[in-house]
Amino acid sequence: MAGEVTLTCQVGRPRVQITGGSQLAYVLIEARVAGAAAGVQIPQRLPLNLALVLDHSGSMRGPKLQGVKDAVKLVLDHMAPTDIVSIIVFDDNVRVVAPAQPVRDKELLKAAVDGIRDGGGTAMSLGMNIGMTELRKNASPQTVNRMILLTDGATYGDADRCRRIADDAGASGIGIYPLGIGADWEEDLLDNIGQRSSGMPAEFIQRPENALSIFQQQLQSAEAVAVRSAQLTVRLPNGVSPKRAVRVLPLIAGLDSSVLSEHAFTIPLGDLERDTPQGVLVEVMVENKPAGVFRIAQAELSYELADGSRETARADATVTFVTEQVPTSEANALVMNYAEKANAHRLVTRVLDEYKTSGKVTIKLSPSVTRVLDPETQRLLDQLQAGGDLSPEQVKTIGSKTRKLTQQF
């Protein structure tokens, strides 16, 4: 039955003055799970099929490993007997602590978690590969299939294999949700793994005691899934060309320019959750038009229901070309706010990338960027631009905060 998801398009400036050349336009595309008020019946909760893939290398020794073990046991306490869980640990080897099974004997599973000890080095692809094997035993359209991947350090020599596994996961409808604990994990790699699998960029567990709340959020996110394997296709008419696309909800995540093509491109969105819209901001260049209403983009969302069928929703983005000057007050405040925050995230990311590569910063951030940042982030960026240094933890904190800018409006 269609109608499970509503798809909307909003433009930054609904009316555009006719000029002599192309103009930049913003299109905000939002996908929301329809509620009971819309008269749509959606299962309250899909069964979960989770693989918990955990780093237990030597660097996890002490509070970090204990914090993760406590968090895993909390997750087990809140899972239903109809849910499936597998627990895999990796260092420079891999071990299945609990093969995929219904969460019935929670005490036995928690005892197995208590038995996890810290080990050697870090070879993340080993854990990811076995995690995929365990997930595939029970993966189906009727279940939420996710890997929660946790590490505290850099993987050794297998980053490309990790990316290939993430691609395979995405093609199989399995999202990977990476968690980095401490200050030494590779945020670029973990972000990439999450996005390639249609999961999410990495979540930062700053301190061991934060693991409980982060794992609880991961469980709540999985429990909120209403439809699966959503894909957004954006079609552009002649005279409209794509410039940039960025996910802005629930987090800001830049999309590689390789996904863009002249007339149509597709963005995997993965699972859609109740009460958590997904949003993509597309920047396009629109050629000059005569006076009138013109469609500048069409969005189509395809998604999978629990019975394995796929449904679609469509929405158009239109602008009206006029001869008179258009006051700036007519701009859509929501769209322009997201555009401002997406731009801030992009420029702050460039600053951090430059600092991580060269140890210095030459990029200057304008007031239009810094004004959307919290005072602590502003202070740390000012410190960098004045030639100071930041700790790895501070760098990760800035990245984590700026990708969540659109959660506040």
Image (cartoon, rainbow, N blue to C red):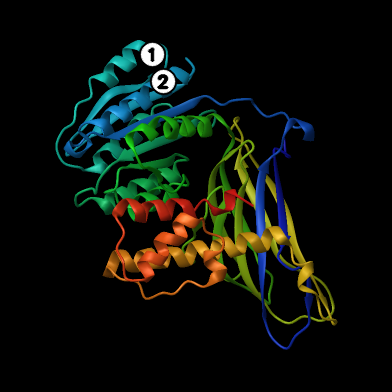
Q: Is residue 61 above or below residue 112?
A: below
Per the model, the C-alpha gap separating discs 1 and 2 is: 6 Å
Residues 70 and 196: in front is 70
Q: Which mark is residue 284?
A: none
Residue with the mark numbered 2: 76
Quarter of the figure with the N terminus:
top right
Q: Is residue 140 left or right of residue 356?
A: right
| In the image, farthest residue toward the left | 120
Q: Which of the 4 image quadrants contains residue 134?
A: top left
Residue 314 place in picture, x, y as percent = 71, 52
| Residue shown at the point (32%, 29%) measured from the top left | 67
Q: Counting residues from the N terminus, which is met first, the one under dot 1 or under dot 2?
A: 2
Q: In the rendered image, is residue 356 in sight?
A: yes
Kind of residue at disc 1: Lys
Label 2: element kind: helix
Q: Is residue 396 above or below residue 226?
A: below
Residues 387 and 26: in front is 387
Residue 210 place in picture, x, y as percent = 39, 35
Q: Is residue 58 left or right of residue 304?
A: left
Q: Is residue 231 left or right of residue 56?
A: right
Kind of residue at disc 2: Leu
Q: In the rendered image, is residue 259 in sight?
A: no
Residue with the mark numbered 1: 106
Residue 404 place in picture, x, y as percent = 52, 50
Q: Residues within 10 Å of mark 2 (few under 14, many from 20)?
A: many
| Residue shown at the point (71%, 65%) measured from the top left | 12
Q: Is residue 155 above or below residue 280?
A: above
| Residue shown at the point (56%, 60%) measured from the top left | 372
Asked whether the residues under the numbered discs 1 and 2 touch, taking CB atoms below 8 Å apart as contact, a structural biologist would say: yes
Q: Is residue 186 left or right of residue 241?
A: left
Q: Residues within 10 Å of mark 1 (few under 14, many from 20)?
A: some
